[in-house]
């Protein structure tokens, strides 16, 4: 799958409380969650994000709560992929389980700025910063996790497994 | 090659002789936990799979985050969980009136035991490592899947050994140990790893200290935090757990990614400043900070010993007139014990308010939300931006002794300042 979009750039330790504040967790509806996505770190995000835009952040993205509402809110905002230096583990797991691809790019994220255009080839693990004309290759996900991702998430994977 | 505690529990639950860090394995789970926020989406996923629950006795459902229901939407979510519990005849559903904050409640009622493997759709599920179990937080989809299959996949983490030596000075507690550790290694210092506690100092820690420490392993990014099983553990567990269980012990030649040593007798009460739990400072350095609210409770510090410590400091004194003090016993039995011991009367006479058990203010749900510019000292676990309310409010994390002293003084204060 090839993705291309404009970058929303954030820093280190973006926690799940700023991705989707708990005051909105009285709903689990993806559309409602998307309306408040990133609200406490960037109140402009929900109103201005376009389908296909890509979030790029620093270390430990998604730290904190286990709320799956966080990757759900990002996905429902139209963001097809998050690139970060590193991800917190529960967020990583949740994103794979709900079918939001993640790319762990390491320190090279510092070369990507807000507003850059990036292109991602998920199956080959390639990231291209079109604006800066730079290319990166990332480690593909372990096979078993790719199978979950390819099935579209954990539930479809389990249903397939059962047959 | 020897194995760590976490590796042994994984091997046992995967039906393997050995496991090594990095290995992907499928494990049977002994308990699956969810709450009023995470269970409703999990139930939706569970229903997509179309199987019965794997074991009605091995699922725990606790309405604690926004319960007693804070608004109509929360009531709808709690209702969904209640109806699910009824439909599937779930043994361990805890209704309001019997419930507590999940991580205070489950150990108390004997649902977690040494050597067991527990997953919960709540990041602080890692609390149960205090009894020598492997316990970790997962999301709703993982919870929904495990309710159907009784198993889940893991990548075996490498372990960090945290050696605790000696004995804590007066006024230092489990919260100060874990905050000090997070201050040393950072909020991603144990990312994807297990924190295994060891050393002669462990014997000097009460179960309350251990539960507080394991609870905040996630705040260092860890997958789990785990304590060795000793006499203190068994004394705590044996009256509560009647089923058979089998503790694990780390091998002498177990391999650790890193070893960190903390001399307990050198520790001092600390506070984590906004907006990360790693911003740790000794209380003395920040004692001029004026505050508006104190919260004593949560899955981190809502147990009877926590309330006892707060009551000792507050007893016979008055809450500072500028401070709202909210005290939240972590469960009904903690509440009753606090009442029997006179703590509740102490708190109310001093000018504090006592709430029914709930996660409420910790995550900015209700029961003590902060306005713009307000500051709270809280015995909770996270001080992220906006965590307890307005995005421009601030949370300072501390143990119950510092929180109680701060409530009296109207600013961040050490308990020795009140004792004078």
Image: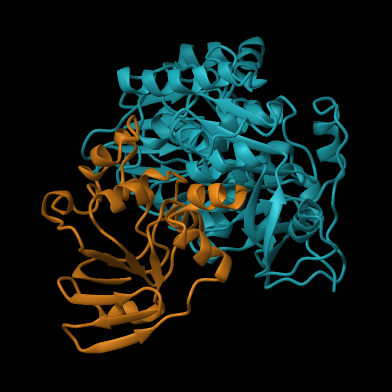
Chain colours: A orange, B cyan
Q: Nearer the viewer, residue B105 or B319?
A: B105
x 56%, y 42%: residue: B145
Left or right relative to B211: residue A62 = left
For residue B191, say whether it is visible.
no
- Give the position of the N terminus of chain A as an image quadrant: bottom left
Q: Nearer the viewer, residue B329 or B307?
A: B329
Q: Position of residue A156 (x, y in %)?
A: 49, 49
Work out whether B293 lies above or below B167: above
x 81%, y 47%: residue: B203
For residue A54, say whether it is visible.
yes
In this rendering, the count of numbered labels is 0
Work out whether A15 lies above or below B316: below
Work out whether B91 lies above or below B371: above
Left or right relative to B392: residue B284 = right
Quadrant housing residue B128: top right
Q: Position of residue B400 (x, y in %)?
A: 54, 35
Q: Position of residue A13 (x, y in %)?
A: 38, 61
Q: Position of residue B158 (x, y in %)?
A: 67, 68
x 44%, y 37%: residue: B378
Q: Nearer the viewer, residue B211 or B157?
A: B157
């Amino acid at each position: 799958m090839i993705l291309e979009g404009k970058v929303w750039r954030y820093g280190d330790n973006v926690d799940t409380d700023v991705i989707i504040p708990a005051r909105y967790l009285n709903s689990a509806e993806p559309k409602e969650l998307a309306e408040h996505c990133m609200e406490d770190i960037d109140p402009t995000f929900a109103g201005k994000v376009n389908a296909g835009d890509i979030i790029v952040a620093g270390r430990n993205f998604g730290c904190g709560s286990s709320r799956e509402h966080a990757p759900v809110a990002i996905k429902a905002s139209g963001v097809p992929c998050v690139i970060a230096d590193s991800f917190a583990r529960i967020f990583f797991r949740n994103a794979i389980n709900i079918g939001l691809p993640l790319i762990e790019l390491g320190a090279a994220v510092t070369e990507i700025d807000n507003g850059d255009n990036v292109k991602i080839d998920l199956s080959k693990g390639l990231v291209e910063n079109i604006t800066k004309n730079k290319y990166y290759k990332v480690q593909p996900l372990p096979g078993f996790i790719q199978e979950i991702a390819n099935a579209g998430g954990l539930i479809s994977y389990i249903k397939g497994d059962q047959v | 090659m020897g194995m760590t505690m976490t590796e042994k529990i994984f091997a046992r639950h995967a039906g393997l002789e050995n496991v090594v860090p990095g290995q992907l394995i499928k494990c049977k789970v002994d308990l699956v936990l969810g709450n009023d926020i995470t269970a409703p989406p999990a139930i939706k996923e569970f229903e997509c799979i179309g199987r019965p629950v794997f074991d009605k006795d091995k699922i725990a459902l606790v309405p604690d985050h926004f319960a007693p229901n804070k608004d109509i939407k929360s009531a709808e979510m709690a209702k969904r969980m209640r109806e699910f519990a009824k439909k599937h005849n779930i043994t361990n559903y805890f209704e309001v009136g019997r419930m507590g904050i999940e991580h205070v409640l489950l150990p108390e009622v004997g649902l977690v035991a040494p050597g067991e493997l527990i997953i919960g759709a709540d990041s602080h599920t890692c609390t149960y490592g205090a009894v020598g179990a492997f316990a970790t937080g997962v999301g709703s989809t993982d919870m929904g899947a495990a309710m159907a299959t009784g198993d889940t996949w893991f990548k075996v983490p490498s372990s960090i050994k945290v050696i605790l030596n000696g004995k804590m000075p007066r006024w230092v507690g489990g919260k100060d140990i874990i905050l000090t550790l997070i201050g040393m290694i950072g909020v991603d210092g144990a990312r994807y790893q297990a924190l295994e506690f060891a050393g002669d100092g462990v014997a000097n820690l009460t179960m309350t200290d251990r539960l507080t420490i394991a609870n905040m392993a996630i705040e260092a990014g860890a997958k789990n935090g785990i304590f060795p099983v000793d006499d203190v553990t068994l004394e705590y567990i044996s009256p509560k757990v009647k089923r058979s269980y089998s503790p694990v012990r780390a091998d002498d030649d177990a391999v650790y990614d890193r070893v960190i040593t903390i001399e307990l007798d050198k520790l001092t009460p600390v506070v984590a400043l906004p907006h990360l739990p790693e911003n740790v400072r000794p209380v003395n350095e920040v004692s001029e900070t004026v505050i508006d609210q104190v919260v004593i409770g949560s899955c981190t510090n809502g147990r009877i010993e926590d309330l006892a410590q707060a009551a000792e400091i507050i007893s016979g004194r008055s809450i500072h007139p500028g401070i709202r003090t909210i005290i939240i016993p972590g469960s009904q039995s903690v509440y009753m014990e606090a009442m029997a011991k006179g703590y509740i009367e102490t708190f109310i006479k001093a000018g504090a308010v006592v709430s029914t058990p709930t996660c409420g203010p910790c995550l900015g749900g209700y029961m003590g939300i902060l306005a713009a510019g307000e500051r709270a000292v809280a015995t909770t676990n996270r001080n992220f931006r906006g965590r307890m309310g307005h995005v421009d409010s601030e949370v300072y994390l501390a143990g119950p002794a510092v929180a109680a002293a701060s409530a009296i003084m109207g600013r961040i204060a050490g308990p020795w300042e009140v004792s004078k």
